[in-house]
Image: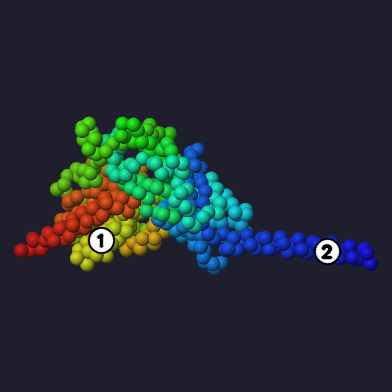
Amino acid sequence: MKALARKFSAASALLAGQLLLTAALLHASSPSAIDGLWEGTATVRGQQVPVRLQITGSASHLEASLLNGPERSPASSVTFQDGKLLLSFNYFARTLEANLAGDQLTGTFGLTSNAPHATPRVPVALHRGTANASSSETGPDSSISPDIRGDWEIAVSSNKGESAWLLRIQPSADPGSRTTIKAVVQRIDGDTGSLYGSWDGHQYTASHFTAAGPALYSIVPQPDGTLRVSNLLASDALRAQSRDLVARRPVEARKENLAAPTQSTQQTRIKDPATPFTFSFPDLAGKQVSSSDPRFRDKVVIVAIGGSWCPNCHDEAPLLESLYKQFHSRGLEIVDLSFEEEDQLQNPTRLRAFIQRYGITYPVLVAGTPDQLTEKITQADNLNCWPTSFLLGRDGRVREVHAGFAGPANPEAHNALEEEVTATVQRLLAEPSPSRTAAK
C-alpha cells in the first residue's frame, strides 16, 4: 500500500507540474500577457534611444503602435504566439520581433530586407511601463532647465548646398510622458519628425523611435547664448557635418551675416522653363504612363518625385491626395514618380503598402532606383531632395518647384506650405487652357 501511495503521489506531482507548465505557456501566449504599455531602449550605433510601445486588443485582434509623444506609428499587423511577438510596419518594410520573458520583451527592429543597402537590425529591450508617468520624473534639475523655446538657425555646410537649417523648439504637448520639449530640425529636403526630450542637468536629449526608424539629438546651451547641436546617430561619413553644430537665434545670425535656411522654391530649377516637362514610366501593373497621354492634356499637373522609403514623402502623400480629391474635377492631375531600391523594384510590397496606407488614388509610377534620379529626370538642375514636386501649368511648363516637405512635426511651416501650394494650384487652374485659347 505504501508503494502504491508513493507512486500515486509522484504521479500527482508530475501531473501538477505539467498543468503548471501548460498554464504558464497559455498565459505567455494570451493577449493579457502582452497588452499594455512597454518602455525601454534600442541600441543604435552605441547610443540608447528611448522606445515606447502600446499594445491593445483581444486574442482575435491585437493592435500595436510605437509612441512618439502624442503621435503614433501603427503596426500594420500583430502576431503573438508562444511568447513570440511580431509587429510588421509594412509601409516602411520594417518589423519588430521580440520574445516575452516575464515582464521583459527583448528582440530587434529593422528592415525586413536582406538586400545590400539594408542597415543592420538594432537590439531592443523593453519592460512594462506606467500609463501615466509623473511630470516629476523628467530627470535631474528639470525644474531649472534653461528656456530654449523658439526658432534657431543651425549653421551648416551640407552636401545639398545649404548654409543653415531651422531648429524649432516648443514645450512638449504630451503630459503623459517624461518629456519637456518638442524639437524639429527643418532641412531643405524635409524635417526630422518630432523629437521629444528632457533636460538632464547638462543638456537636452531629444529623440524619436517610429516606424521610419530612430533619431537622437543632443542640444547643449552655451554661455554665449548659442546652442551646440549634435545628431548622435549620424553615420561616420556624415559625422563631421552632424556634430557640434552651432545654433543661433535668427536675429543674431543676421547680425553675423550668416545665410538663412534655403527656401524650398529656390533649391531646384528647370533648365529651360519654356519647354514642357515630360515623363514616361510604368505603373505597378506595367502599363506605360506618359506626359503626352490625353489625361494630362490641358491639365494642371503636380509631378511628385519620391519613394516609399522616404519619411518626408510619407508626410507629403496626405496633402497630395487631399488636393487630388479637391481639385481633380476642375482639371488637376497628380502623378507620383517613385524611385525604389532594387529589391523593391522586383517586388514592390512596401510601395503597395504606402499606397494603401494613404488611400492614394492618383497614378503612382515606378521610375527607377534612387541613384538614377538625375539620369531619369533630366530637365532640372540641382535636383537632390526627396521629395521634390514640380507644379505644371495647363501648357505643360513648370511654373514652380518645391524641394523637400515640411511635415506635421513642423506645424507652422506645414500649414504655410499647404496654403501656398493650394493657392498656386487654384491660380493655375484659373488660367485658360492652350487648346481653348488656340480655338478662339
- Is residue 252 at all visible to an observer of this figure? yes
In the displayed structure, does residue 263 sit left or right of residue 145?
left
Q: Residue at the spot x=46%, y=44% of the render?
A: 139
Q: Residue 12 falls in which quadrant of the image?
A: bottom right
- Report x, y in % for residue 220: 38, 36
| Amino acid at pointer 1 | Leu
- Report x, y in % for residue 133: 48, 53
Circle nearer the N terminus (1, 2): 2
| Amino acid at pointer 2 | Ala
Residue sitting nearer the eye, 17 or 282: 17
In the displayed structure, does residue 256 sit left or right of residue 102?
left
Instruction: State the SS at label 2.
Output: helix
In the displayed structure, does residue 336 sit left or right of residue 352?
left
Quadrant (top left/top right/bottom left/bottom right) for the N terminus: bottom right
User: What's the mark number on residue 11?
Assistant: 2
Q: Residue at the spot x=34%, y=42% of the render?
A: 147
**Render colour scheme:** rainbow
**Pointers 1 and 2 in contact (C-beta within 8 Å):** no
Q: Residue furthest left?
A: 440
Q: Residue at the spot x=37%, y=47% of the render?
A: 181
Q: CA distance from mark 1 to mark 2?
A: 72 Å
Quadrant (top left/top right/bottom left/bottom right) for the C terminus: bottom left
Residue sitting nearer the eye, 311 or 15: 15
In the displayed structure, does residue 256 sit left or right of residue 87?
left
Q: Residue furthest front?
A: 143
Position above or below: 122 against 364? above
Would you call the spot at circle 1 few (<14 residues within 10 Å), some (14-19), or many (20 or more)?
Answer: some
Position above or below: 395 against 186? below
Instruction: State the SS at label 1.
Output: helix
User: What's the mark number on residue 323?
Assistant: 1
